[in-house]
Image: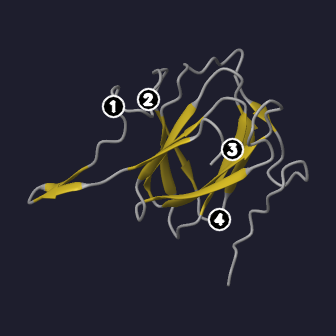
């Protein structure tokens, strides 16, 4: 696992009325600070990548559909520099992943339906000065291909 990344398996608590799933609590190990919560979506087969933040951590949870969430550690002083992590999260594997600042990340919707993703970053989005630093999804600077791996 990339240094400072935290993965928390989630679980549904069902009863006769439906299901409940706690995603993030302020007493969780994965929680550090609250900035905002937003919902984003991704259509089937679409890749949204790569970017990192200098100030904020992202806490990413897919609540509908399925994602292949991929992280790449390009931090100079990190003991896991050059490592890639893949997480398959969503309806069939509920989880939340804390992506530390300075770690490139992105995802691909791998379900047949649109994926709904909640993000609870540690900082509020600044429209005039966004804390986002991007690379093309298919850059050769990051050793990862978004193709499906059959086998």
* 10 relative to 46, above or below: above
Is residue 139 shown left or right of residue 133? right
- Residue 68 % position (x, y): 60, 59
Label 1–label 2 contact, CB within 8 A: yes
**In percent of the image, x 63 and y 17: which residue is there?**
126
Q: Nearer the viewer, mark 1 or mark 4?
A: 1
Per the image, label 3 sits on a secondary structure element best described as: strand
Residue under circle 1? 25
**Label 4: how many residues lie within 10 Å, few (<14), some (14-19) or many (20+)?**
some
Is residue 72 shown left or right of residue 45? right
- As rendered, which of 138 and 72 lies closer to the eye? 72
**In percent of the image, x 47 and y 24: which residue is there?**
32
* 125 relative to 120, above or below: above
**In percent of the image, x 91 and y 53: which residue is there?**
140
Is residue 135 shown left or right of residue 21? right
Residue under circle 2? 31
Per the image, label 2 sits on a secondary structure element best described as: loop
Q: Quadrant of residue 98?
A: top right
Q: How many numbered marks does the figure carry?
A: 4
Question: In 3D space, how far apart are the residues under numbered discs 4 and 3 (Cα atoms)?
Answer: 17 Å
- Residue 141 % position (x, y): 90, 48
Per the image, label 4 sits on a secondary structure element best described as: loop
Question: In 3D space, how far apart are the residues under numbered discs 1 and 3 (Cα atoms)?
Answer: 23 Å
- As rendered, which of 2 and 39 lies closer to the eye? 2
Q: Quadrant of residue 123?
A: top right
- Residue 115 % position (x, y): 51, 56
Residue under circle 4? 45
Residue under circle 3? 105
Q: Tell me, for residue 102, which label it has, or none.
A: none
């Amino acid at each position: 696992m990339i240094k400072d990344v935290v993965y928390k398996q989630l679980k549904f608590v069902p009863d006769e009325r439906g299901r409940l799933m706690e995603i993030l609590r302020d007493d969780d190990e994965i929680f550090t600070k609250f900035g905002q919560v937003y919902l984003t979506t991704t259509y089937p087969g679409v890749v949204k990548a790569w970017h990192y933040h200098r100030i904020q951590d992202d806490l990413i949870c897919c609540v509908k559909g399925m994602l292949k969430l991929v992280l790449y550690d390009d931090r100079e002083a990190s003991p896991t520099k050059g490592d890639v992590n893949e997480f398959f999260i969503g309806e069939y594997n509920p989880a939340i992943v804390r992506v530390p600042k300075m770690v490139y990340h992105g995802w691909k919707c791998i379900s047949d339906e649109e994926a709904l993703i909640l993000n609870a970053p540690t900082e509020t989005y600044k429209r005039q000065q966004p804390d986002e630093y991007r690379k093309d999804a298919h850059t050769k600077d990051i050793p990862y291909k978004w193709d499906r791996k059959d086998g």
